[in-house]
Image (spheres, rainbow, N blue to C red):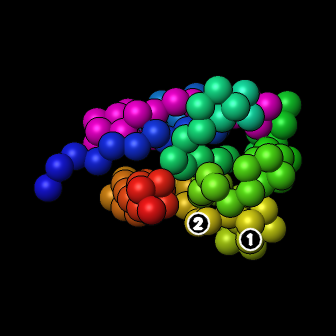
């Protein structure tokens, strides 16, 4: 099986959490970019659309709710968003912003990789169709 490829944007103000996700995904073969808040994320996406956004909800400057709403307003459902949060009721919060999935902190690394692979493969299928 060939290694995965895909462009993943990690949006999290927790530098340690972001670094762990970046390291795991990079080692798995993904191109990984990061942003520390929603406003930065919108700038990164405007420069080059990722195949997937891993979005924390509780951040300064622009939180995940505002960022997800703005991403949906600009790009519709073209960019999958997976909410990554330690907040209670994570699934309900993810549904509020129309996310494509939810990953509750703390999470198993295998679950992170499986979720990312699933969404990146779907993105590849969409772009080749």
User: Which of the two residues, 73 or 61, is positioned nearer the viewer here?
Assistant: 73
Q: Mark 1 points at which residue?
A: 95
Q: Mark 2 points at which residue?
A: 101
**Helix, strand or loop at disc 2?**
strand
**Residue 75 visible in rendering:** yes
Dot 1: element: helix
Q: Quadrant for residue 26, please give it.
A: top left
> Few, some or many C-alpha atoms within 10 Å of disc 1 (few <14, some 14-19, many ≥20)?
few
Q: What stretch is highlighted in magenta?
A: 21-41
Q: Specify the farthest residue to the left.
A: 1
Check the image and name the residue furthest to the front.
129
Q: Residue 44 placed where, x, y %?
A: 65, 28
- Residue at 68%, 60% (x, y): give it: 77
Q: Distance between the residues labelled 1 and 2?
A: 8 Å
Vertical placement of residue 98 versus 61, above or below: below
Report whether residue 89 is seen. Answer: no
Q: Is residue 81 rendered to the left or right of residue 21?
A: right
C-beta proximity under 8 Å, tags 1 and 2: no
Viewed as shown, does residue 93 lie left or right of 101? right
Image location (x, y in percent) of residue 51: 51, 47
At 36% from the left and 39% from the top, the residue drawn is 30
């Amino acid at each position: 099986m060939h290694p995965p490829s895909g462009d993943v944007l990690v949006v999290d103000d927790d530098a340690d959490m972001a670094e762990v996700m970046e390291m795991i995904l990079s080692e798995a073969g993904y191109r990984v970019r990061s942003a520390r808040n929603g406003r930065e994320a919108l700038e990164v996406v405007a420069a080059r659309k990722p195949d997937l956004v891993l979005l924390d909800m509780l951040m300064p400057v622009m939180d995940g709710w505002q960022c997800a709403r703005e991403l949906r307003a600009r790009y519709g459902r073209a960019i999958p968003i997976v909410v990554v949060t330690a907040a209670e009721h994570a699934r309900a919060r993810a549904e509020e912003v129309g996310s494509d999935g939810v990953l509750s902190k703390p999470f198993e690394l295998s679950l992170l990789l499986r979720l990312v692979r699933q969404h990146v493969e779907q993105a590849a299928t969409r772009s080749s169709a």
